[in-house]
Image (cartoon, helix red, strand yellow):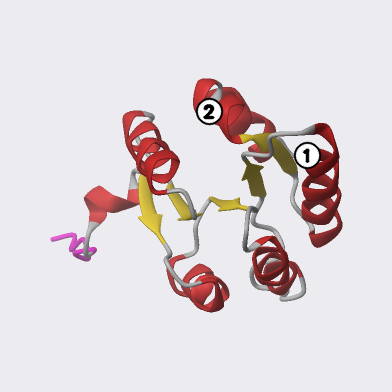
């Protein structure tokens, strides 16, 4: 007789996990719902200080992080992911809701310097989430 081990939460293993930090409640909730609609398990992280710990614990396929009013802290959390060999491979999508070109350029530069693979406007992220995820997950 062949015995097959019982794996806990096998149903969860078929869905990729996206770890998400957001500041804007409306956009964040929309993003979580859109991810779930694309068959992702979406886990919201409310404390940037816990992002790295959560990534180690949950092993997400992708991290989405808002760089807005907390841009400096968000980028520090992002750098923390990329400085740890265990989490360095996780692609990060940074998004923001900058209202002017100067702020857009500054936030984009900060997020890229911190290691974001994709940096995008919040509205474009919500409109093109599937393509953005494909771009972030593309192996160079």
**What residue do we see at 74% from left, 51% from top?**
116
Q: Secondary structure at mark 1?
A: helix
| Residue to which mark 2 is pinned | 129
Nearer to us: label 1 or label 2: 1
Q: Alpha-carbon neighbours of circle 1 within 10 Å: few (<14), some, or many (≥20)?
A: some
The disc at residue 74 is none
Q: Measuring 69% from the left and 39% from the top, which residue is drawn there?
A: 98
Which of the two residues, 67 or 7, is positioned nearer the viewer here?
Answer: 67
Q: Which residue is mark 1?
A: 104
- Report the side of 135 relative to 61 (left or right): right
Relative image position of residue 138 (x, y in whole percent): 70, 35
Residue 140 visible from this viewpoint: no
* SS at circle 2: helix
Q: Are marks 1 and 2 in contact (CB under 8 Å)?
A: no
Mark 1 → mark 2, Cα distance in angstroms? 19 Å
Q: Earlier in the sequence, mark 1 or mark 2?
A: 1
Choose between 43 and 90: the one closer to the eye: 43
Q: Quadrant of the N terminus?
A: bottom left
Q: Is residue 54 above or below residue 117?
A: below
Residue stretch rendered in magenta on the structure: 1-7
Q: Whole-percent x and y of residue 85?
A: 73, 73
The structure residue drawn at horizontal position 84% and vertical position 48%, both measured from the top left corner, is 106
Where residue 9 sits, quadrant-wise, is bottom left
In this picture, is 90 found above or below 85?
above
Q: Nearer the viewer, residue 85 or 42?
A: 42
Q: Is residue 6 magenta?
A: yes
């Amino acid at each position: 007789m062949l015995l097959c081990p019982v794996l806990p939460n096998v149903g969860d293993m078929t869905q990729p996990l996206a770890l998400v930090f957001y500041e804007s409640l409306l956009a964040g909730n929309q993003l979580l719902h859109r991810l779930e609609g694309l068959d992702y398990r979406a886990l919201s992280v409310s404390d940037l200080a816990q992002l790295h710990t959560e990534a180690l614990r949950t092993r997400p396929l992708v991290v989405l992080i808002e760089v807005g009013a907390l841009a400096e802290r968000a980028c520090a959390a992002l750098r923390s992911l990329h400085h740890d060999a265990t989490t360095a491979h996780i692609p990060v999508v940074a998004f923001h809701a900058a209202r002017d070109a100067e702020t857009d350029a500054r936030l984009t530069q900060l997020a890229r310097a911190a290691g974001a693979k994709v940096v995008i406007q919040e509205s474009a992220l919500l409109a093109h989430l599937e393509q953005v995820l494909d771009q972030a997950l593309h192996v160079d």
